Amino acid sequence: MTKRGLRSTRNPNPKMKKAILDKRLESLCKKAKGMSILFHIETGLIVFTPGENNVFAWSSLIQAKDRVKDYLSCSKNRRLIKFVNKAEQMAEEKEMEFLFNQLVKARIRVDELDLRETKGLLKLFAVKRAQNEERKKQLKETAENRVGSNDNNDGEENV
């Protein structure tokens, strides 16, 4: 017996297995009902055994189907919103890259930029600066590794 009196092995007796399953499902239903009342949320349970046609759905099969459909449609909307936000962010980054290149080529002046463009360019400058610092650090480490590996030879000829 493990903690809470659960066995770690499977019970081969089908009647015993069915009794344990019924008891556990009853417990799950009570917990789900308590959660739905306590937190004002929609709960549902769908339990099935592979290879059998018996499906248990709490509180009813129709409500369970509706709740699953609501959940899936909600996640689709969230995914679409996330995708749109990501696309807008990428468009903003590309626009700032373009403005940066225009500034470097002196095709536009800084005083021609509005507030949004200025803030976007400041963010871009911060990102570019961090990338350059990271590259410097990597180059320094590789240079030190090369110098360190040459120090180990101490007068030996390379053959």
Image (cartoon, rainbow, N blue to C red):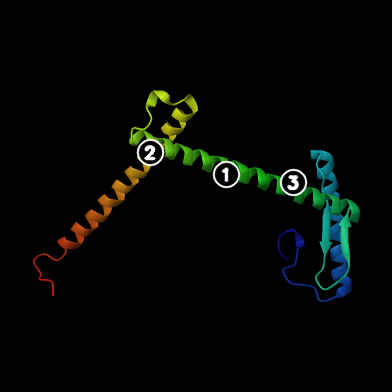
| Numbered badge on residue 74 | 3
User: Residue tagged by mark 1?
Assistant: 87
Name the residue: 87% across, 61% down: 56
Q: Amino acid at mark 1?
A: Ala
Viewer-side label of 2, 3? 2
Q: Is residue 152 left or right of residue 105?
A: left
| Numbered badge on residue 43 | none
Q: Is residue 49 left or right of residue 60?
A: left
Q: Which of 95/17 is in front? A: 95
Q: Secondary structure at mark 1?
A: helix
Name the residue: 82% across, 68% down: 49
The answer to whether residue 141 is above or below residue 85 is below
Q: Position of residue 155 (x, y in %)?
A: 8, 66
The answer to whether any part of residue 135 appears in the image is: yes
Name the residue: 85% across, 54% down: 65
User: Residue tagged by mark 2?
Assistant: 101
